[in-house]
Amino acid sequence: MSGSSESGGPPQAPWSVSSLAEKLAPDLRALENFRQKILIKRRNGYQVLFLAALICAGVALPGVVLLPPLGVLFGVIPFLIAAIVVNSKFFGSGRVVYEAEYKKRVIGGITGSLEPGMAYHPDRGLPESWFHACGLYKGDVDRYSCEDLFEGRIGKTSLWLSEVHAEDKRTRTDSKGRTTTYWVTIFKGLLVVADFHKDFKSEVIVTRDLAEATFGRIGRMFQKWGGNLEEMENPEFEKAFVVRATDPVESRYVLTPDMQERMLALRGRLNNDVRFAFRTSHVYMTIPNNDDWFEPSISLPAHDHGQMNSFLGQMAACFQIVEDLNLNTRIWTRN
């Protein structure tokens, strides 16, 4: 069953968590059995660690009374060794393996059910070059990570999205001349790229209007210093966003009154700081989010409907962007 019609309209028969759980029942049972084995192994590990602590304490106690440093040595060092052995034997990579399998089977299965034209790759993400290509953030990216890539087609529109985290490495020196290194987040959240089926000769950048919202007319003057500032006819859109374009005429072909209304609605649904860039025949979007999406918890049963419903809502919100921006309506064509 397709999550959308061929024309990219609303779902014909939306999937419920119950129906998805029924469809994925074999995978959920296998995952739950695996999860239980991991939890049993963990409990055994805690018991062994507790026993090791008692033994080490018993061995160290006489030494602590007679010669404290020696007692601590004979108690702490053996316990640390025991802890390392227990961690590798009883804890290990079980959780990591479970999460990877859950993502592949369950989140991948939900993806195929919602939108058969989309594929999910948990260990991949949009490359750093795509983040730079959007042109929405300034500064050097010294560390970049990405995961949870969704790619494919919804109706007539090619869509790519993933979680990304871009950081800038900085240093500071205190009054005593000591230097420390720290990381500053440039962007953390979802990077979304969709095909607009038009080769833009110019670019249009749409970001949150902070200056005018904070400082009023003075803020508007500050904005003009950035150059290429465009004023839109929609007062609500003008209040919410700052538009910069290298071609004023083309910017109005892209940001039609209908598109402005859709972008406002999308901003209200997702995040006040959602940003857009129209360039190189694509629309780029960044949606800030400090939480990690699509991350299963080993503490919850594999078939937990609350967790599955959360993933279902997250994916639906992402895929809905195509309809929110009416990207399947082909107003423009390539030159």
Image (spheres, rainbow, N blue to C red):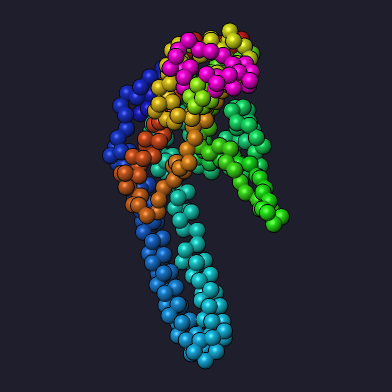
**Magenta-colored stretch includes residue 235:** yes
Q: As displayed, is residue 178 above or below residue 276? A: below
Nearest the viewer among 315 and 205 is: 205
Q: Position of residue 305 (x, y in %)?
A: 30, 44
Reply above or below: 131 against 42: above
Quadrant containing the C terminus is top right
On the image, the x and y values in percent for residue 6 come to 41, 19
Provide the residue span drawn in magenta.
217-242
Q: Is residue 175 left or right of residue 48?
A: right
In the depicted structure, whether residue 24 falls above or below residue 131 = below
Task: Looking at the picture, tell me which residue is in the foreground, 30 or 267.
Answer: 267
Q: Residue at x 52, y 81 (%)?
A: 75
Residue 282 within the magenta-colored segment of the rendering: no
Which quarter of the figure has residue 17?
top left
Q: Is residue 325 visible?
A: no
**Residue 252 spot, x, y in % from top left:** 53, 10
Of residues 246 and 13, the one nearer the viewer is 246
Q: Which residue shows up at 35% across the image and 29% down it?
A: 1
In this rendering, the answer to whether 91 lies above or below 165 is below
Q: Position of residue 318 (x, y in %)?
A: 44, 30
